[in-house]
Image: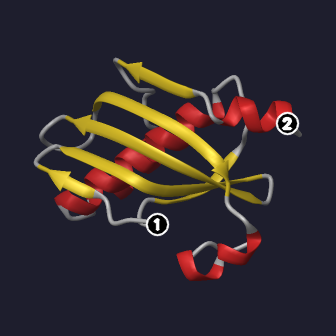
C-alpha cells in the first residue's frame, strides 16, 4: 500500500492537444451553458488523463467542487479541491485547464493526484460510494 500511496503523490503535467471527443459527448457539451461546458469539458479531460496515467487508476466519477469551488477566469478553470472515484475509492485531485473560446477543445491541462479521501469525509463533500 505504501508504494501505491507514494505513486499517488506524483504530480503529472501534460500540455498539448487533448483526445478527440466522440459525437455524443460533443453534442451533450454544446447544450450546456459556457461556464458549465468549460467545467464539464475539463472534467472529461481529467478523467481521460487519469485513466492513462501510469498509476493505473480507473476514474468513473469526478466532483470538481468537492473540497473547494473551482476558479473560472475566461477560458481557464483551476480546481484545487476536486476529487475523483476509482475502483470504489475517492482521491483528491487538483487541475488547471484552459480551452478554446467555445470550451470544446482543451489547449493546456495540468493535474496532480492526491491521497485517498477517508470514507468518513465522503458525505460532507458530495462523494458517493
Please say if 54 is above or below 27. above
Res 113 quadrant in image: top right
Say whether residue 26 is visible: no
Which residue shows up at 66% across the image and 48% down it?
Answer: 115
CB atoms at circles 1 and 2 under 8 Å apart? no
Q: Which residue is mark 1?
A: 67
Residue 45 pos. (x, y %):
45, 39
Q: Earlier in the sequence, mark 1 or mark 2?
A: 2
Question: What number of labels is visible?
Answer: 2
Q: Which residue is mark 2?
A: 2
Would residue 96 appear left or right of 50 to someone viewing this image?
left
Which residue shows up at 47% across the image and 56% down it?
Answer: 82
Res 100 quadrant in image: top left
Q: Which numbered mark, 1 or 2, is in the foreground of this view? A: 2
Say whether residue 43 is visible: yes
Residue 48 pos. (x, y %):
55, 36
Amino acid at each position: 500500500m505504501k508504494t501505491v500511496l507514494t505513486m499517488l503523490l506524483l504530480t503529472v503535467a501534460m500540455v498539448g492537444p487533448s483526445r478527440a471527443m466522440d459525437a455524443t459527448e460533443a453534442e451533450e457539451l454544446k447544450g450546456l451553458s459556457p461556464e458549465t461546458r468549460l467545467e464539464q469539458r475539463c472534467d472529461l479531460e481529467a478523467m481521460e488523463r487519469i485513466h492513462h496515467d501510469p498509476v493505473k487508476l480507473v476514474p468513473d466519477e469526478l466532483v470538481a467542487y468537492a473540497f473547494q469551488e473551482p476558479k473560472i477566469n475566461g477560458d481557464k478553470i483551476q480546481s484545487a479541491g476536486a476529487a475523483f472515484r476509482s475502483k470504489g475509492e475517492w482521491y483528491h485531485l487538483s487541475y488547471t485547464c484552459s480551452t478554446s473560446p467555445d470550451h470544446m477543445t482543451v489547449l493546456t491541462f495540468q493535474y496532480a493526484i492526491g491521497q485517498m479521501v477517508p470514507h468518513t469525509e465522503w458525505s460532507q463533500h458530495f462523494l458517493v460510494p
